[in-house]
Image (spheres, rainbow, N blue to C red):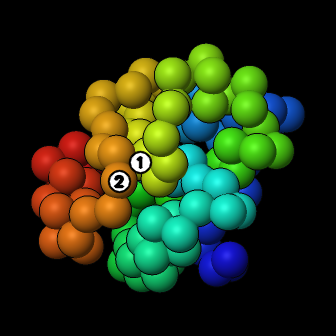
Amino acid sequence: MSENILSITTESWDKEVIQSSSLVVIDFWGTHCRPCKTIAPIIEELAKEYIGRAKIVKVNVEESPEIASRYKVIGVPTIMFFKDGNVVDQIVGVVPKGQLKSKLESLI
């Protein structure tokens, strides 16, 4: 995982996501999920491109199932966008980088 992406657990969720003053993009993923591996390089590229404009984090649903359950994540990858501690949008499945960039730009 890139140095520009935080790995979030239940313990760090509130501090890094809910209390964040910037847009937070959460990649919910699983270790045995092939589509998650497909989108991972795109997420890493976006993390580099949006340094200082958005915080990009990952949540392993196998290690933090309570977070996935709380936000009703049933399929991975699920990308959620948080602003001021609230979900403002989400994308489920693998999508092109351009679609993720458009969503980021519209929310920043």
Residue lying at 35% horizontally and 53% vertically, measured from the top left: 93
Residue 97 vs residue 76, the one in the foreground:
76
Residue 40 rendering spot, x and y as whole percentages: 50, 73
Name which of mark 1 and mark 2 comes first in the sequence.
Answer: 1
Q: Which residue is mark 2?
A: 93
Residue 18 vs residue 29, the one in the foreground:
29
The correct choice, above or below, for 34 with respect to 45 in the image is above
Residue lying at 26% horizontally and 63% vertically, measured from the top left: 95
Of marks 1 and 2, the one in the foreground: 2
The correct choice, above or below, for 18 with respect to 80 in the image is above
Q: Is residue 44 visible?
A: yes
Q: Which mark is residue 79?
A: 1
Left or right placement of residue 66 versus residue 100 in this view? right
Residue 15 rendering spot, x and y as whole percentages: 71, 34
Kind of residue at badge 1: Ile
* SS under mark 2: loop
What whole-number distance in Å separates the C-alpha atoms at marks 1 and 2?
8 Å
Residue lying at 62% horizontally and 31% vertically, measured from the top left: 68
Quadrant of image for the N terminus: bottom right
Q: Residue furthest top?
A: 70
Residue 100 rendering spot, x and y as whole percentages: 25, 61
Quadrant of res 31: bottom right
Residue 89 rendering spot, x and y as whole percentages: 28, 34
Left or right placement of residue 87 versus residue 70 in this view? left
CA neighbours of label 2 inside 10 A, class few (<14), some (14 to 19), many (20+): few
Residue lying at 30% horizontally and 29% vertically, measured from the top left: 88
Q: Are marks 1 and 2 in contact (CB under 8 Å)?
A: no
Left or right placement of residue 108 versus residue 2 in this view? left
Kind of residue at badge 2: Gly
Q: Is residue 43 visible?
A: no
* SS under mark 1: strand
CA neighbours of label 1 inside 10 A, class few (<14), some (14 to 19), many (20+): many
